[in-house]
Image (spheres, helix red, strand yellow):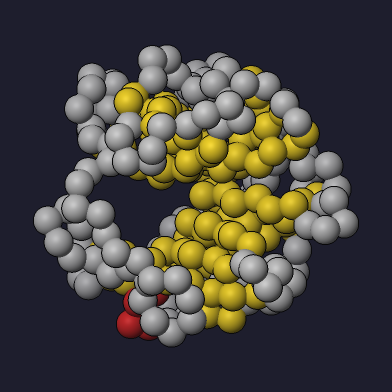
């Protein structure tokens, strides 16, 4: 299991008019020519949440880029977008999955496509939605047979905390990356009273050298009204369907920023 050390400096700060309330849910892509692009949600008093981007040559120094990558859509009653995840479809074609909060308070997963990783066009329809639960923080992987597995949090509606609240990470399968069918079972259960009695969510998945899968995810525990603490944990899988949680904490909270 890789070990991690927090970097002392802030990578992206909420220092502009459009993200003065906070910057959240970062995701980094290596660009085809040079450098890296980070996508993140920025919020302000006038903006509940929009996806912006920043550029870096070295993964340490980042420069915010002008413009909006994914905007809210008032006509479709989308008041907030966040948690972008990007997968390469072909040589010059990428798809972004992202979480959308609707004006009716429901949360769904949408998608957009791009040929340059800068200009994005939303695809029609909804990738994942439910009448009984909210979903978001998507992570998509491409399987060896060419199909797509999409991981995301599932919160029964209305949301509630507690170890038996059912705030799990689940998955859906697709042959084309557009139409997803919910898979049976739970990928990462909310089952640790000490660290997960509020929720588990936000999966990030990488392929390891032995062709297994490694997932990092966030576990949150509640310590009274209006007090929750989050940490980063990990899990491993041979087939990306059955996962085994690791007992250790990958990154703990604490320090001047968290």
Viewer-side residue, 195 vs 210 = 210
Left or right of residue 36: residue 228: left
Q: Hey, which quadrant is residue 51 in on the image? A: top left
Residue drawn at (22%, 43%) of the image: 10
Location of residue 224 with respect to 11 vertically, above or below: below
Q: Position of residue 5 (x, y in %)?
A: 29, 64
Residue at screen point 38% across, 15% down: 66
Dividing the picture into quadrants, the one containing residue 200 is bottom left
Q: Is residue 47 visible?
A: no
Q: Which quadrant holds the C terminus? A: bottom left
Q: Give the image location of residue 216, x and y in percent.
A: 49, 65
| Along the viewing direction, whichever of 76 and 139 lies nearer the viewer | 139
The residue at the far left in this view is 256
Instruction: Name the one closer to the observer, 192 or 243.
Output: 243
Q: Quadrant of residue 254?
A: bottom left
Count of numbered circles on the image: 0
- Residue 13 placement, left or right of 243: left
Say left or right for 185 vs 118: right
Q: Is residue 7 visible?
A: yes
- Image coords of residue 55 (percent x, y): 41, 28
Q: Nearer the viewer, residue 192 or 203?
A: 203
Q: Residue at x 48, y 76 (%)?
A: 1
Image vertical order of residue 85 relative to residue 149, above or below: above
């Amino acid at each position: 299991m890789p070990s991690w050390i927090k970097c002392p400096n802030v990578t992206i700060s909420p220092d502009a008019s459009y993200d003065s309330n906070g910057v959240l849910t970062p995701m980094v892509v290596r660009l085809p020519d040079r450098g890296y692009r980070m996508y993140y949600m920025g919020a302000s008093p006038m903006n509940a949440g929009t996806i912006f981007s920043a550029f870096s040559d070295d993964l340490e120094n980042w420069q915010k880029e002008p413009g909006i990558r994914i905007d809210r859509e008032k006509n479709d009653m989308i008041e907030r977008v966040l948690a972008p995840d990007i997968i390469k479809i072909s040589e010059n074609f990428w798809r972004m999955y992202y979480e959308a909060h609707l004006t009716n308070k429901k949360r769904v997963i949408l998608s957009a496509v791009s040929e340059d990783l800068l200009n994005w066009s939303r695809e029609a329809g909804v990738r994942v939605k439910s009448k009984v639960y909210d979903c978001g923080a998507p992570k998509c992987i491409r399987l060896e047979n060419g199909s797509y597995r999409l991981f995301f949090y599932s919160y029964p509606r209305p949301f509630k905390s507690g170890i038996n609240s059912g705030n799990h990470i689940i998955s859906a399968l697709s042959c084309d990356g557009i139409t997803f069918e919910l898979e049976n079972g739970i990928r990462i259960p909310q089952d640790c009273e000490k660290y997960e009695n509020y929720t588990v969510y936000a999966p990030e998945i990488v392929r390891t050298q032995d062709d297994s899968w490694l997932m990092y995810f966030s576990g949150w525990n509640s310590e009274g009204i209006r007090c929750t603490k989050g940490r980063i944990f990990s899990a491993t899988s041979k087939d990306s369907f059955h996962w085994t949680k690791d007992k250790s904490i990958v990154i703990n909270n604490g320090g001047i920023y968290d």
